[in-house]
Amino acid sequence: MNKQIKKIPSNWLRLFISTAIAVYLYVFMEWLFFLTKTSFMSAMNFYQRISVFLLSAFALALPGLVFVLVLAGLDVMIRREGLTKVLIGVGTLIPALVFGSLAFILIDNFTYTMFKFGVVSTTGVWRTAYALLFVVLCVVIYRVLWGRVGLQGNVVRKPSKVQTYLVLSLLLVSLVVIVIESPGANADLNVGMPDTGEGVLSLPNIILLSTDGLDATHLSIYGYERDTTPNMRKLMGNALMAENAFSNAGNTAGSLTSVLTGKLPTQTRMYYSPDILTGADSYQHLPGILGQMGYRTVQLTDPYQADAYTRNLLNGFDMANNRSENKTLFTIINQYLGDGGSAYFNFVILERLTERLQHAFYLNTMLNPYKLVTEEGSSLSAQQQIDRILSIIDESKSPVFIQVHMLVTHGPRFKLLQSVFSAGETQDADWMADFYDDAILDFDNDVDKVFEHLSETGELNNTIVIIYSDHGMKWNYRKRIPLLFWFPDGEHAGTIQQNVQLLDIAPTILDYLGISRPDWMGGQSLLQDVPQRNIFSINTASEQHIKMANGLYEGRLIPPFYQLGVVNLFVCDRWYSLFLKNPGLQYGDVGGSTASCEKNDMPLPEQAISMILDHLKKSGYDVSKFPQTIPIQLVPNK
């Protein structure tokens, strides 16, 4: 190996090594920063974390290293006097910019952590100060590197053997990890496409329309005494209504991800921010299947909890919350090398840098992530979402799949367009029922706007509309939620009394389109006979919620269950909740349920515990240390 190294011009070898060290060091420092905070890596094992570092660094380093080799090749082939210094000068820009960016990020991290000010908090001339800081750092580092890799008269500086073998070792180990990891970009969707011979234009539009925290018990179409859903009531004769539907997660991120993937959170480990999808789970989902069929796929949701890109759902949506998937050269390389979260990590660290540089150079204004998730106005308004839905359908020349999640009914305070039940009242407390019911009325009017427009444009009988909620009011994971399907020409209208789950949405859509459900997708089509099934859902214990502060998630994720705090089991009209952090079981009756069974068919609390633990064990959790005897409490239905 020594002979092979000596054949390479020393100055080019030094530049190659400097470039590799710059990128690997940059990624390592960002990796270390995220590793010491609560992040998507918190629930990973040691090998997975190391893989994220090695694959991310290799993907970022590869283009720069190839560029240096190309310049070296030109130098060797042309051998023109003075050209070597020019080519080395160009090549030196890469490690100089990387080292400069690293210094810039480290300074910003330090000042923000210690003194609570940084790039994000700067305005006016202070933004210019940060721009000048970045330029000065890059220039100083460039001059230092030029002295190390450039030709100084007739002196050729030889590279350090320690640095040489360090870089070769890092690249070799990275390649070994690449061979071990299965390429995520080749994840098989394993679906049978419809054989209708009618072409893409014959496919119906699909709208998933949900609102946050909506209890079925507060909807008049489900028997509530107040007429909160007069417009939805007009649809009932031509809709398929599930009387006993349950979410598979008690929070938005876990719930909506399960809708799109058709997989339980216990399978994907996608519970709550900052969890992300990894591996094949990132590529196996409903929008990916529909995209292969020719659908234009669009998402309009909360930009942090429910956003597809934030959750690392890849190759699914053409547009998510007014931005397209960040298909940079580096993330594409990651996806083909094998992605256990490395592509997502590169997306995050590149976004951290570009946001700060764009802010410093007045190209864009950086928004504080903490304010975005804690202050009003971080999402599109309900009217903007409705207008966007309708314009997408009107403008699209191909069938569209649109997932919309609205915050109209998101508490604890409600912003109303009309006051009916709360007329004359002041909203001076959280979760006031009159204001909540008025918020439902607002959502009902939004639903009416969609149907009215579809009818006026002749698209009503060419569109599937699915209305549902992510979870119950106050993130209640034990209550029934609404679930209604509108199919063209009122097909499949009726009611389903058996227990169903949001996991059933994806296979129901595929069944209607004539597509077989892939093996990896859970749930079942509601267009077929629905048996009485056991339904599982999850929630994070309130004390385990990871809160966001200063743009970073704070808290602890503790094995073996990490963010998973509660696993729920629904059998007929009864629920069972197994608490994992402080072991105990609660059970009771589902309010308003019509899915009754013979009492002899209901599991005893002890049997329910065994069923839930068995589910966790099959999902890969270590339940061997879970106590064999735990408190059991019957909770009366209120």
Image (cartoon, rainbow, N blue to C red):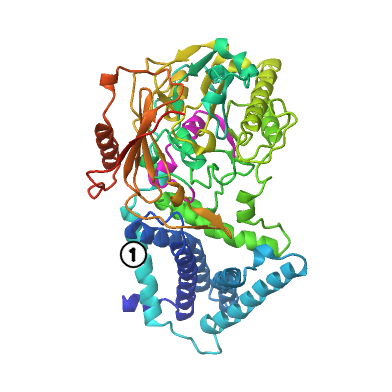
Q: Determine whether 479 is above or below 77 in the image.
A: above
- SS for tag 1? helix
**x and y, in percent, of residue 95 in the image:** 54, 72
Instruction: Residue at 27%, 37% (x, y): give it.
Output: 609
Q: Is residue 492 among what the camera can see?
A: no
Count of picture labels? 1
The answer to whether residue 100 is magenta is no
Q: Determine whether 474 is above or below 37 in the image.
A: above
Instruction: Residue at 36%, 41% (x, y): give it.
Output: 266
Q: Kindly indicate the quadrant of the structure image that contains residue 508.
A: top left
**x and y, in percent, of residue 291 in the image:** 51, 32
Q: Is residue 116 among what the camera can see?
A: yes
Taking 392 as reference, is 253 left or right? left
Q: Residues within 10 Å of mark 1 (few under 14, many from 20)?
A: some
Q: Which residues are magenta?
A: 273-301
Extreme residue in the bottom direction: 154
Taking 510 as reference, is 361 left or right? right
Instruction: Residue at 60%, 55% (x, y): give it.
Output: 370
Q: Determine whether 622 is above or below 485 in the image.
A: below
Taking 559 as reference, is 277 left or right? right
Residue at which label 1 appears:
173
Q: Kindly indicate the quadrant of the structure image that contains residue 396.
A: top right
Check disc 1 and give the amino acid type.
Val
Compare residues 553 and 452 and report the one nearer the observer. Answer: 553
